[in-house]
Image: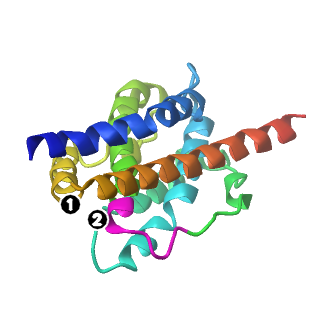
Amino acid sequence: MKNEEADVLAALRAATAARHDELDAQTPLAAPDVDLAAYGAHLRLLERWLAPVPAWLASFGDGPVLPDYLGAIRADLAHAALAGLTDDAVAAVPAAPWPAHASAAYRWGVCYVVEGSQLGGAVLYKRLAPTLAPHPLAYLRGNGSPGPRWQQFLAALRTQVVEPSQIADACAGARDAFDRLIALNRALHQAGARCGA
């Protein structure tokens, strides 16, 4: 059982490593000097990516459920410090629907990416909070340390995704989740390049 438990996490990490690196290097918060406009662009990107996911997950009778990360994103976007600094370039990008008949394992893979992003958010919060004050960066801050939630998620993942076919489905879901976010990020860059031309 221990080897099976290690396999799902190792497989997910291996399946998404290159995508994770690409995204980390190119998101609006990757620049060395991040400002509030970049944070607003980052939030819009995540909002567009996450918006269809809760309803999609709820359409199934099994599998993972996510906390209300969208609520935190939208609260941050509504903060007065971002007034006039965000645009809707990402909103113009058509979003493909998530698969209607996805397995529970595939959905666990998607949620692996969403939940994992909370760990990165905590790191970003420590780096950006002094610079971007007075914005509270509530989305990045979360509800305290994301470590316990992450460990609970991994424990559930490891009990639900154990068979090789399930692990393959989870990896497919995780890759798709990254690919959708990467595509949105590229569209954001392209929109910015057109505006700057």
Q: Which colour scheme is used?
A: rainbow
- Which residue in the rendered view is the most extreme toward the right? 197
Q: Where is residue 17 in the image (x, y as percent from the top left)?
A: 44, 32
Callout 1 secondary element:
helix
Q: In which quarter of the image is residue 121?
A: top left
Q: Is the magenta stretch mostly helix, strand or loop?
A: loop
Numbered mark located on residue 39 in the image: none
Callout 2 secondary element:
loop
User: Which residue shows up at 50% across the image and 31% down it?
Assistant: 18
Q: Is residue 145 visible?
A: no
Mark earlier in primary sequence (1, 2): 2
User: Which residue shows up at 58% across the image and 30% down it?
Assistant: 35
Q: Give the range drawn in magenta.
A: 98-107
User: Which residue shows up at 53% across the image and 48% down it?
Assistant: 43
Lateral position of residue 76 relative to residue 6, left or right: right
Look at label 2 and name its amino acid: Pro
Q: Position of residue 88 (x, y in %)?
A: 70, 55
Residue 9 lies in the magenta-colored region: no
Residue wearing tag 1: 160
Q: Distance between the residues labelled 1 and 2?
A: 9 Å
Q: Nearer the viewer, residue 33 or 24?
A: 24
Q: Where is residue 75 in the image (x, y as percent from the top left)?
A: 45, 57
Q: Quadrant of residue 194?
A: top right
